[in-house]
């Protein structure tokens, strides 16, 4: 069955694509969630306009992501964390902590899911954290974890 996608569907296609799917997949998943509709001759022109709009939006998002990457790569994001006398962290630094620190220090709002951490940071010092804010823009952010100043 030929289907025009209304939204991006991971593993299937992007908005405006005409894809071939099984009848059951369309009937049970795509149609009820409003992700696609049956392709007809008249709808193909609409799909082409959706593809063009989607491509233009994607290019604008990529340009914005490139600007953010260019401004963040040379910066060092500093995060103060509680430590004991020996310098061991109490707890850890998570992606949410990095996201909040980036917003506070650079005024760029980056979703915590964009930071690719294998595990939370549990040591003091500098750490490189890969950031993926667009499907085609991936860059490292330098995070420095320092001991929190005691009052």
Image (cartoon, rainbow, N blue to C red):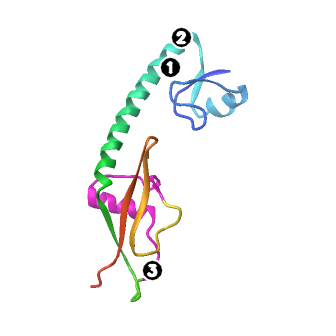
Q: Does the magenta stretch include residue 27?
A: no
For the point 56% across and 31% down, which residue is it? Answer: 13
Query: Mark 2 — residue?
Result: 42
Please name whichever residue, 73 or 19, is drawn nearer the observer in this view of the structure. 73
The part of the chain drawn in magenta is 88-116
Q: Count residues near mark 2 (Cα–Cα under 10 Å), then give few for <14, some for 14-19, many for 20+.
A: few
In this image, 133 relative to 8: left or right? left
The mark tally for this picture is: 3
For the point 27% across and 56% down, which residue is it? Answer: 106
**Labels 2 & 3 near each other (Cβ < 8 A):** no
For the point 72% across and 29% down, which residue is it? Answer: 24
The percent position of residue 89, horizontal first and vertical second, equals: 43, 79
Mark 1 vs mark 3: which is more N-terminal? 1
Q: Marks 2 and 3, how far apart in space?
A: 62 Å
The percent position of residue 66, horizontal first and vertical second, equals: 34, 43
- Above or below, comparing residue 53 to residue 99 in the picture: above
Q: Marks 1 and 3, how far apart in space?
A: 54 Å
Residue 104 is labelled as none
In this image, 12 relative to 122: left or right? right
Q: Count residues near mark 1 (Cα–Cα under 10 Å), then give few for <14, some for 14-19, many for 20+.
A: some
**Labels 1 & 3 near each other (Cβ < 8 A):** no
In this image, 1 relative to 41: left or right? right
Name the element at disc 1: helix
Name the element at disc 2: helix
Mark 2 vs mark 1: which is more N-terminal? 2
The percent position of residue 6, horizontal first and vertical second, equals: 52, 28
Q: Which image quadrant: the N terminus? A: top right
Query: Mark 3 — residue?
Result: 90
The percent position of residue 68, horizontal first and vertical second, equals: 32, 47
For the point 30% across and 44% down, which residue is it? Answer: 67
Mark 2 vs mark 3: which is more N-terminal? 2
Query: Mark 1 — residue?
Result: 47
């Amino acid at each position: 069955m030929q289907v025009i996608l209304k939204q991006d569907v991971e593993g299937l296609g992007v908005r405006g694509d005409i894809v071939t799917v099984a009848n059951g997949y369309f009937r049970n998943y795509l149609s009820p969630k409003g992700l696609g509709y049956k392709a007809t001759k008249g709808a193909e022109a609409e799909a082409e306009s959706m593809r063009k709009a989607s491509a233009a939006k994607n290019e604008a998002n990529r340009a914005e992501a490139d600007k953010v990457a260019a401004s963040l790569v040379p910066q060092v994001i500093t995060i103060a964390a509680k430590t004991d006398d020996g310098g061991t962290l109490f707890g850890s630094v998570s992606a949410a902590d990095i996201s909040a620190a980036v917003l506070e220090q650079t005024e760029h709002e980056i979703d915590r899911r964009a930071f690719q951490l294998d595990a939370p940071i549990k040591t003091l010092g500098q750490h490189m954290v890969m950031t993926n804010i667009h499907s085609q823009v991936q860059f490292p952010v330098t995070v420095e974890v320092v001991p929190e100043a005691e009052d």
